[in-house]
Image (cartoon, helix red, strand yellow):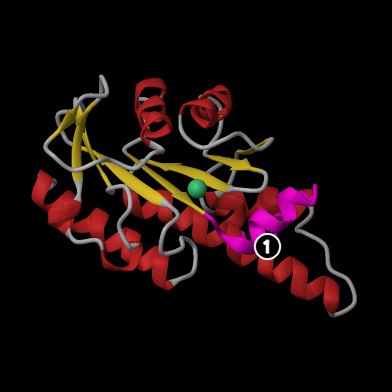
Amino acid sequence: MNGPGRLGRELAHTIRRLYVRGLVSGVGGNASVLLPSRRQMLITPAGYFKGGVAEGDLVRVSLDGKVLGKKNPSSELPTHLAAYRLREDVGAVVHGHPPTAVALITAGVAVPVMTPEHAVMVRRLEVVDFAVPGEAGARAVEESLGKCDMVGIRNHGFFSLGADLHEAASRLEVLEESAKIFLAGRQAGGISGLGEADLKRIRNAYGRE
Ligand SMILES: [Zn+2]
């Protein structure tokens, strides 16, 4: 069953898991999930320690931006709303600060496709320049949301879109894993991403061509 209760538990669990994995910090990062009616969403609250968010802390917001209840939603609410309005295929949005991947895009280095999971999960990634989070950030990111699965913001973090929370969170995890492998490989003497022929074979094998 995919009711609000189950989705709320999953959302609270997802943000805590991302905290434990170092992909969001205590004060930074947020996540949301669209409710089955597709007219409301649940989003993590503003100002909460991300390692301790519980189901009852989540904020319900209608897709026209009306906050239902007394808690304040994450300041990144405008970007989450934009993602659901623009994309009918998106059911969850995760925003995190994966440190290695943020370092690479901020340095102007594209994160190469290092693993089969990366090839399958992170097909479309766009990078935009820094914008102050909130309304201005939403406008900058919004222009990319319609055409990609992840948007990287230099000096800040990533928005990851998915059909569900598992997919959105996994994209963030896989990207950070690739960034770490790439940097460690460079230190070890040189490394490159997967070549086009391998990428094609992987995507064929996973039925994502
Ligand atoms: Zn952020």
Q: Does residue 100 belong to the magenta stretch?
A: yes
* Apparent side of residue 209 relative to residue 94 in the rendered image (left or right): right
Front residue of 89/79: it is: 79
For badge 1, the amino acid type reads Ala
Q: Residue at x 30, y 57 (%)?
A: 48
Query: Which x, y percent locates residue 160?
Result: 48, 44
Q: Which residue lies at the image location 61% right of the left edge and 34% below the top edge? A: 131
Disc 1 secondary structure class: helix
Kindly tell me whether residue 9 is visible in this rendering: yes
Q: Residue at x 11, y 44 (%)?
A: 4
Of residues 87 and 49, the one nearer the viewer is 49
Badge 1 crowding class, 10 Å Cα cut-off, few under 14, some 14 to 19, many 20 or more, is: many
Q: Which residues are magenta?
A: 97-116
For residue 102, what is the image quadrant? bottom right
Query: Can residue 207 be seen in this snapshot?
Result: no
Residue 170 is situated, as x and y percent measured from the top left of the image, at 45, 57
Horizontal placement of 43 versus 159: left or right? left
Residue drawn at (27%, 24%), measured in percent from left and top? 65
| Residue 127 place in picture, x, y as percent | 67, 38
Query: In the figure, 8 relative to 153: above or below?
Result: below
Position of the C terminus, as image quadrant, is: top right
Quick one: which residue is furthest to the right in this view? 189
**Residue on which the image places disc 1:** 179
